[in-house]
Image (cartoon, grey):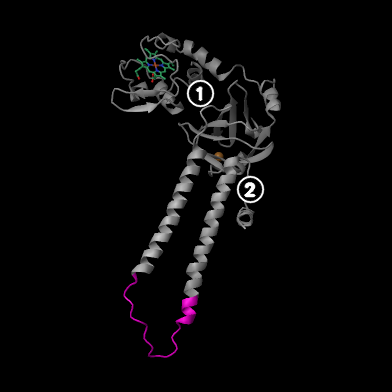
Amino acid sequence: MMAFCLTLANSFMPVAGTDIAAEVDTFYAFLLWASLVSFIILIGGMVWFLVIYKRTEDNQKSAYITHNNLAEFLWSFIPLVILLVIFYWGWVLFAKLRTPPEVVSEEIHITAMQWAWEYKYKNGKTFYSSAKDTLNVPVGKPVKIILTSKDVLHSFFIPAFRIKQDAVPGRFTEVWFEAKEKGNYIVFCTEYCGTSHSNMMIRVNVMDPEEYVAWYHSEEKVGEQSLADKGAKLYQTKACNGCHSIDGKTIVGPTFQGLYGKNREFESGSSVVADENYLKESILQSSAKIVKGYPAAMPIYQGQLDDDEIEALIEFIKSTK
Ligand SMILES: [Cu+2]
């Protein structure tokens, strides 16, 4: 019975390509059935009352009832419990969808633009979706996508994985998934972004892990260098190394070693965890947050580094463990 209700409610859903997708579907099935039952009780009850309490004579009076404590309690309390269940269930699922595992197998930078996606792998492999290339990922491994946009709002949506995340200009957002089965799945841009918005429909190709590794190390779309290596070069050419070490020593500024993911305290008394957005802000406008115990001595790099360079510097900082 349960299984039948679930299958029926999910019959119009796209394939469930991840374990979480199946959980999301169960949740939706519950919502759907709960709505159906409520609908029948409410509308059915209304129609029934219309029939049985229909006035039969002109001077018929309705009964004088002021209130009914038990009925009022029940019609408030039962829906409250149901809504709390929906809230809690949705919350747990949402947290799962939003929180990537501590260790992910792949991290892919994706930059949205009018009207293509640019994929950039850690080893520097870079290509555009407009060339009809698939986004290759391994099966059964957690994959994290770090999103940003060059121009307007876009949104990265893989219906089969039940994940959706906006790509916002000037900011990094992230999303993750672990595909269950090999195959091709559709990716949509799901934020209307101009005339060729529909060209942003691409495919994610879930591959055998060995096949994926072979492709990853193949010559195809190979970048000149890995993102971290590119960042290491910038670290020298942009003179970051004059003030930041990568071996734990303090020069003028704090060391980059182990910085990513660390809790940072500021002169203002606030604190944040050093993620991509924090690193980007620190590089472009270091004065926005002054690290506690350090002078506000870092030059402003806004306008002197392009987005690709910042991405490379961030990957470099992440690689100094
Ligand atoms: Cu778009």
Is residue 141 depicted above or below 232 in this figure?
below
Taking the spot 39% from the left edge, 22% from the top edge, the residue there is: 282
Which of the two residues, 296 or 116, is positioned nearer the viewer here? Answer: 296
Neighbourhood count class around disc 2 (C-alpha, 10 Å): few under 14, some 14–19, many 20 upward: few
Element marked by disc 2? loop
Q: Are marks 1 and 2 in contact (CB under 8 Å)?
A: no
Residue 14's mark? 2
**Horizontal and vertical percent position of residue 200:** 60, 39
Disc with the residue nearer the chain's start (1 vs 2): 2
Q: Quadrant of residue 188?
A: top right
Of circles 1 and 2, which is in front? 2
Residue 44: give x, y in percent of width and height.
51, 71
Residue occupying image coordinates x 67% and y 28%: 209
How packed mark 1 is, by other alpha carbons closer than 10 Å (few <14, some 14-19, many 20 or more), is: many
At which x and y percent is residue 18? 61, 40
Q: Label 1, on which residue?
A: 311
- As for residue 52 lying within the magenta part, the answer is yes
Characterize the magenta stretch by its predominant secondary structure.
loop
Check disc 1 and report its element: helix, strand or loop. helix
Q: Amino acid at mark 1?
A: Glu
Residue 273 appears anywhere in the view: yes
* Residue 26, above or below 1: above
Whether residue 188 is visible here, answered yes or no, is no
Specify whether residue 118 is painted magenta: no
